[in-house]
Amino acid sequence: MTQSLQARYAPHNACFGCGPSNPDGLRLESVVDGDEVVCTWTPKTMHEAFPGVLAGGIIGTLLDCHCNWTAAWHLMQRAGAESPPCTVTAEYTIKLRRPTPTDGPVKLRAKIVDSSEDRATVTGTLEAGGRICATCEGLFVAVKEGHPAFHRW
C-alpha cells in the first residue's frame, strides 16, 4: 500500500495530528510496511520548542496519531473488515530520549505488541538523523456507536 491509511480511510478527517483535511494540522501519512506502520514527516520552525529542536507536545501528537492508526489498521485486519474501526487513545506514554532536531525529516515507526477484539497495544519510535529520539507505548480502543469519535472517519 503506497497510499497513506489516512488518505485511504479518512480523507475528510480533521484531526490536528493526522487529518488530511486539516490545512493547519500536521497531516501525518502513515503507510503499512510489512508488520510495521511507518511515516516520514518534516517539521517546520513553528513546531519548535526552541531553535532547532522539536517541541515535546508535537512529538507526543505525532506518536499518538501514528500509533492510533497502527492499531486501527491491525484491528481491521484482525476482523477481516474493509475499513478500520474508529479508535481512540485510552493511554499512552512518551519517553523523550534526546532532543529531536528539526533540520530534516523525522521517521515514525509503530508495531503491535498485543491485541484483542477491540483494542491494541502499540509501541512506536520517532527517529531523526538516524537516532531514536522518542519512544511511545499506548493502548488504543475501537469505540462503539454513541461515542463522539464513532463516525469520525
Image (cartoon, rainbow, N blue to C red):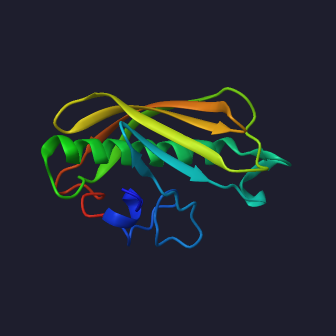
| Left or right for 83, reference 19 | left
Single out the residue that lies furthest toward the left: 80
| Residue 2, x across and y down, in percent | 41, 59
At 45% from the left and 52% from the top, the residue drawn is 30
Q: Does residue 90 sit above or below 11 in this rendering?
A: above
| Residue 38, x across and y down, in percent | 48, 45
| Residue 61, x across and y down, in percent | 55, 47
Residue sitting nearer the eye, 92 or 42: 42
Q: Quadrant of the N terminus?
A: bottom left
Q: Quadrant of the C terminus?
A: bottom left
Label total for image: 0
At 44% from the left and 68% from the top, the residue drawn is 14
Displayed quadrant of residue 86? bottom left
At 38% from the left and 72% from the top, the residue drawn is 12
| Left or right for 133, reference 117 | right
| Residue 72, x across and y down, in percent | 30, 47
At 57% from the left and 64% from the top, the residue drawn is 25
Displayed quadrant of residue 139? top left
| Left or right for 40, reference 89 | right
